[in-house]
Amino acid sequence: MSSSVLGKGRTALVTGASRGIGPLIAAQIAREGGHVVLTGRSADDLKTVTAALTAAGADVSFIPADLTQPGAAEALVRDIEREHGGIDLLVNNAGGDPLREFHTMTMQENLRTLQLNLIAPLALSHAALPGMLGRGRGHIINISAMAGRVSFPYTEAYSAAKDGLIGFTRVLRGDYHARGVSASVLILGAIRGAGQGQRMLDESGMKASSFMAPAESVARAVTKAVKKDRAELVIVPGPGRLLRAIMDYLPALGPALNRAAGATTTMQRIIEQRKATADAAA
Ligand SMILES: NC(=O)c1ccc[n+]([C@@H]2O[C@H](COP(=O)([O-])OP(=O)(O)OC[C@H]3O[C@@H](n4cnc5c(N)ncnc54)[C@H](OP(=O)(O)O)[C@@H]3O)[C@@H](O)[C@H]2O)c1
């Protein structure tokens, strides 16, 4: 069913496509044919990515948008429907976390994290669904994270959002699958090669560990989830779904592993480093 959302004559929207993993996802979808609309806040970065993908033979365009702004999701979907006739594949990839201690962030800052990682995907799905249902085809891919499962340090609001995204995707898939619109969630472990995980490695001077999956594997998982119509894919090296199930069964295991692997200490160091850089720049 869902493979019909890829290929010639189809349109995909990829959020968070200005940098990190998003451009790789956009490139992977574009290789199937069809048009890909990229979005993110930075028009300059979107222009650069669009030029590189176009030079590689992809059919892409971009629309800048700040998805934390009220009405931005609806306006984006409206613009794409007007320009391209509809959205067949929506990839809710934009996301991230400021990596600060929960109690030192204002509630406004925590709400912004929820808005970017949870509310924006809901709003985009809500705005795109009527068109998808009208055409009898559509697929929504939500990019979540293992953070919520393993209790990754200093990610309270981010974890709440990413776990929420898993529940949202399951219900969405259950409710609309029979009407031709599917949904899948990709649950990412730490990713190397591009994106926030790689930036942390670069900042801390650490090398990528064998527990990190390459960014390209996320892009490949997007088209796999569509073609095989998978409800959920876990992107970690090794038996990801088993790991996730064990983390659910043994909730104390994740924090213990993080402490043993030094993740808590490393995150504290990165928080301090970033604060020192910001203070020096102020
Ligand atoms: N990399 C990892 O290790 C990892 C692990 C688990 C999960 N994930 C998830 O994978 C997804 C991609 O992550 P990444 O590592 O590629 O992140 P990234 O390098 O930080 O890129 C984030 C993307 O989101 C966009 N974005 C940020 N704030 C936005 C806003 N207010 N409105 C619209 N767009 C916004 C950014 O573009 P602008 O700055 O131009 O707006 C950028 O394109 C995220 O959902 C992340 O949570 C990543």
Image (cartoon, helix red, strand yellow):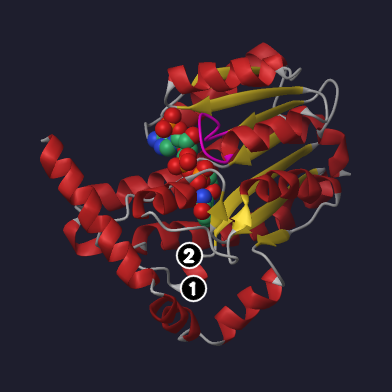
**For mark 2, does the 10 Å Cα neighbourhood hold few (<14), some (14 to 19), or many (20 or more) residues?**
many
Q: Quadrant of residue 280?
A: top left
Q: Is residue 209 left or right of residue 265?
A: right
Q: Are marks 2 and 1 in contact (CB under 8 Å)?
A: yes
Tag 1 secondary structure: helix
Q: Is 127 rendered above or below residue 121?
A: above
To which residue does mark 2 refer?
147
Q: Is residue 17 magenta?
A: yes
Please state if 8 lies on the left or on the right of 121 as rendered: right
What secondary structure do most residues of the magenta stretch adopt? loop
Callout 2: helix, strand or loop? Answer: helix
Q: Position of residue 58 (x, y in %)?
A: 74, 20
Residue drawn at x 17%, y 59% as measured from the top left? 104
Q: Is residue 81 above or below residue 195?
A: above
Q: Is residue 84 visible?
A: yes
Give the numbered dot on residue 150: 1
Residue occupying image coordinates x 89% and y 44%: 1
| Horizontal side of residue 62 vs 197, given as left or right | right
Task: Look at the image and tell me whether residue 67 can be seen.
Answer: no
Percent across and percent down for residue 218 are 66, 49
Q: Residues within 10 Å of mark 1 (few under 14, many from 20)?
A: many
- Distance from disc 2 to disc 1, alpha carbons, whole Å, reads 5 Å
Q: Nearer the viewer, residue 162 or 99?
A: 99
- The CB of the residue at mark 2 lies under 8 Å from ligand 1: yes
Indicate whether 83 appears above or below 104: above
Span colored in magenta: 15-21
Residue 180 painted magenta: no
Residue 153, horizontal then vertical, whole percent = 36, 68
Tell me residue 50's x, y (percent): 60, 18
- Three-letter code for the amino acid on which mark 2 is drawn: Ala
Viewer-nearest residue: 110 or 240: 240
